[in-house]
Image (tube, rainbow, N blue to C red):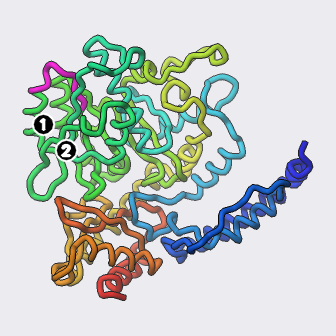
């Protein structure tokens, strides 16, 4: 054995304590660490050492090179994308997942695959989904959309007598309908060979909504009688947190024999709160659902999950056969045959840990608190002379832009970019740019379990005011 590797093996306990100290030092700074850190110019690349440094020295080199440049993206005022943090239980689960180092690919020889099954069942209970749904863990909502739509693609081929997984997609007449699909779903269509342009846009409701016009959808579905159709519905659009009328969409899909795929990456968590539950009514009738764990569930990257009523169709897509893989199989797809990955880490353990640690009540409180925070930011925006609220705060997304007085004689996109840069450079708040119905703006997505009204709202509103006024 390499002598440095052997020495680290013998010194493992001390090395883990060093790693713990590094982690504790970082986490202690999250409340005040800058939400974004610019990289210094002229950084020289690292070179591979001929002789190893050992783990302690490697950690020291990393600390010196990178520790000060890591952002507070896991902290309470990082509102870019839809980014959660990591609950204490999820963090413990993630560390243990690395320590256990299980390959979750088979039901033989380890309980690791059972952890996947149990964590999926806990999520199913949290979301109120019927037992008919089979869940599987993937890297995020992009792969969850990919897996769900791959299953839908297989279903569509079989509707016209083709096994797409075996003979390919050429000549299969699939129609895809959606109003406001997320970019990750469009990316999934590209990866699946269906093409980005295959998604036919259905009109949205009037009045600044992003939700699908179900009357227009009914007309389009009636035109699709000769073509298998996939309806890609939204449970929480990324710009405004709007929801399609999933119950009516499900009725139409059943009437016209269409597949209903719901992108519920973060919006599915509305089911946790009684006063928000109506937003997702009907999601339990979907054929497949994509969701994300490193958003409102607040488990570490990377974590996503896909649910389907039709696991055996998915198995025909993801089935992998080789002599070394032969053995007893579960009645429904095991992880190896349920997702694109042949091998995966014990990704479900942080989810298992956090759901068991905080339960239904804990997640109800997190969703309620972050939605209340979003409403409070929206109220401040609506009353501010510097900003204009672009859409009602329906959930945890605040979509807004600069007031007209700040745009006089300026190019709107550039004016908003200046404000976003000031916010980033100030280190207090991180937002992302957006465009809503042609209007440049910005958006805040609040889903971190650490965010509180008492501590963070004054800091956020003060930072917004300074950025708008040039400070």
Q: Which mark is residue 217?
A: 1
Lower sequence index among marks 1 and 2:
2
Please tell me which residue is depicted at 77% across the width and 61% down the height of the picture: 58
Q: Identify whether 435 is placed above or below 131.
A: below
Number of marks in picture: 2
- Mark 2 burial class by Cα count in 10 Å: few <14, some 14-19, many 20+: many
Answer with left or right where residue 190 lies relative to residue 331. left
Answer with left or right where residue 251 lies relative to residue 310. left
Taking the view exactly as shown, the residue that stands out farthest to the top is 161
Q: Which residue is mark 2?
A: 179
**Measured from the top left, where is residue 187 in percent x and y?**
36, 42
Q: Nearer the viewer, residue 169 or 84?
A: 169
- Mark 1 burial class by Cα count in 10 Å: few <14, some 14-19, many 20+: many
Please tell me which residue is depicted at 45% across the width and 33% down the height of the picture: 135
Determine whether the residue tagged by mark 2 lies in a helix, strand or loop.
loop
Examine the image and state in which quarter residue 220 appears: top left
**Measured from the top left, where is residue 217 in percent x and y?**
12, 36
Region of the chain picked out in magenta, as a range: 223-230
**Measured from the top left, where is residue 226 in percent x and y?**
15, 19
Q: Is residue 372 visible?
A: no
Q: CA distance from mark 1 to mark 2?
A: 9 Å
Q: Which mark is residue 251?
A: none
Residue 228 magenta-highlighted: yes
């Amino acid at each position: 054995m390499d002598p440095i590797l052997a020495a680290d093996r013998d010194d493992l306990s001390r090395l883990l304590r060093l790693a713990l100290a590094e982690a504790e030092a970082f986490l202690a700074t999250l409340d005040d660490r800058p939400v974004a850190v610019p990289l210094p110019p002229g950084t020289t690349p690292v070179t591979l050492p001929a002789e190893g440094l050992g783990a302690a020295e490697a950690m020291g080199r990393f600390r010196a090179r990178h520790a000060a440049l890591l952002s507070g993206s896991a902290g309470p005022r990082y509102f870019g994308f839809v980014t959660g943090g990591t609950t204490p239980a999820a963090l413990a689960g993630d560390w243990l997942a690395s320590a256990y180092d299980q390959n979750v690919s088979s039901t033989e020889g380890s309980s690791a695959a059972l952890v996947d099954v149990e964590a999926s069942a806990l999520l199913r209970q949290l979301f109120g989904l019927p037992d008919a749904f089979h869940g599987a863990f993937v890297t995020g909502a992009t792969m969850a959309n990919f897996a769900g739509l791959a299953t839908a693609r297989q279903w569509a081929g079989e509707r016209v007598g083709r096994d797409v997984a075996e003979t390919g997609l050429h000549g299969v007449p699939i129609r895809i309908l959606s109003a406001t699909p997320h970019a990750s779903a469009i990316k999934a269509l590209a990866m699946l060979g269906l093409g980005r342009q295959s998604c036919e846009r259905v009109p949205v409701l009037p009045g600044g909504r992003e939700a699908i016009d179900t009357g227009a959808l009914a007309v389009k579905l009636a035109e699709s009688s000769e073509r298998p159709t996939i309806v890609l519905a939204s449970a929480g659009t990324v710009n405004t947190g709007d929801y399609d009328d999933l119950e009516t969409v499900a009725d139409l899909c059943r009437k016209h024999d269409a597949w209903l795929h719901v992108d519920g990456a973060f919006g599915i968590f509305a089911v946790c709160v009684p006063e928000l539950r109506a937003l997702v009514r009907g999601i339990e009738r979907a054929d497949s659902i994509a969701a994300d764990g490193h958003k409102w569930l607040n488990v570490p990257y990377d974590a996503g999950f896909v649910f389907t009523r039709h696991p055996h169709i998915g198995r025909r897509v993801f089935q992998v056969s080789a002599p070394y893989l032969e053995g007893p199989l579960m009645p429904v797809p095991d992880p190896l045959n349920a997702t694109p990955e042949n091998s995966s880490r014990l990704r479900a353990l942080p989810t298992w840990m956090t759901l068991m640690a905080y339960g239904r009540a804990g997640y109800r409180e997190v969703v309620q608190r972050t939605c209340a925070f979003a409403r409070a930011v929206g109220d401040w925006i609506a009353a501010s002379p510097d900003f204009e609220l672009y859409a009602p705060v329906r959930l945890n997304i605040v979509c807004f832009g600069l007031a007209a007085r700040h745009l006089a004689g300026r190019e709107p996109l550039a004016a908003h970019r200046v404000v976003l840069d000031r916010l980033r450079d100030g280190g207090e708040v991180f937002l992302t740019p957006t465009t809503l119905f042609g209007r440049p703006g910005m958006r805040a997505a609040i889903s971190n379990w650490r965010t509180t009204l008492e501590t963070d709202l004054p800091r956020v509103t003060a930072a917004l005011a300074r950025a708008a006024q040039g400070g």
